[in-house]
Amino acid sequence: MPRLYLTRQVIKMNSILKLIELTNSKIEDIVIIVLGSMTPMIIRSLTTDGKFQVVGECYTHGIMDGESLLGQLPPFWEVRPVIDMSNGVKEPAYWNSETNSTSRDDPRLGELPAEWERITQRRTPDDPILFAPHRNKLTGEIINSDPRMLPNNLRKRGINLEMFPLV
């Protein structure tokens, strides 16, 4: 993931200008994608020793649906969130206009590895907003996110992940 630097509320990312919506941002601020978060975040360097402060969430046109990690959706696909009626939480869903079908799996991720299966699990207050429980059929391990979005799998896709120490 490239580091994105703010310049007067507009950033340059992959040669395309993107609008940032956050009124208290500064030129030196950095837009980051936090794994598991619904929106990009803005952080600010506080010290010369590499520590950062969260400024807040932001709307960044063109990367709100995972494009910075996974690229553009394939032709005929678009994100159409659905509300889980059991808990009132909005969850991502993907609609294909060619087949008129909806999937809960992001078409950019490809097939789920054979050792994993999506499971139905009751949401708890500790679960993240993007909640997609999966179970490893070999080990029995249950995680509350898609295993294809784990850091090691993203690195295998060539995505550069960075850690930012927060204060």
Image (spheres, rainbow, N blue to C red):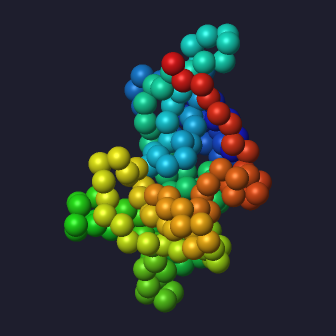
Residue 26 visible? The answer is: no
Question: How far across and down, in percent of the image, does residue 30 sit?
Answer: 59, 29
Judging depth in this view, the residue of 76 and 137 nearest the camera is 137
Question: How far across and down, in percent of the image, does residue 149 sit?
Answer: 60, 57
* Residue drawn where x is 60% and y is 18% of the image: 51
The correct choice, above or below, for 46 with respect to 162 in the image is: above
Q: Quadrant of the rendered structure where residue 18 is?
A: top right
Seen as rendered, the residue at the extreme top is 48
Q: How many marks?
A: 0
Q: Quadrant of the N terminus?
A: top right
Residue 30 visible? The answer is: yes
Q: Would residue 74 appear left or right of 2 to someone viewing this image?
A: left
Q: Would residue 86 appear left or right of 18 to someone viewing this image?
A: left
* Residue drawn where x is 23% and y is 60% of the image: 88
Judging depth in this view, the residue of 12 and 46 nearest the camera is 46
The correct choice, above or below, for 100 with respect to 131 in the image is: below
Question: How far across and down, in percent of the image, does residue 98 sit?
Answer: 51, 87
* Residue drawn where x is 46% and y is 77% of the image: 103
Question: How far across and down, in percent of the image, does residue 44 sit?
Answer: 55, 21
The correct choice, above or below, for 121 with respect to 20 in the image is: below
Judging depth in this view, the residue of 17 and 22 nearest the camera is 22
The correct choice, above or below, for 64 with respect to 96 in the image is: above
Seen as rendered, the residue at the extreme front is 139
* Residue drawn where x is 37% and y is 62% of the image: 91
Seen as rendered, the residue at the extreme bottom is 99
Q: Would residue 120 appear left or right of 115 to someone viewing this image?
A: left
Q: Would residue 77 appear left or right of 121 to someone viewing this image?
A: right
Judging depth in this view, the residue of 112 and 21 nearest the camera is 112
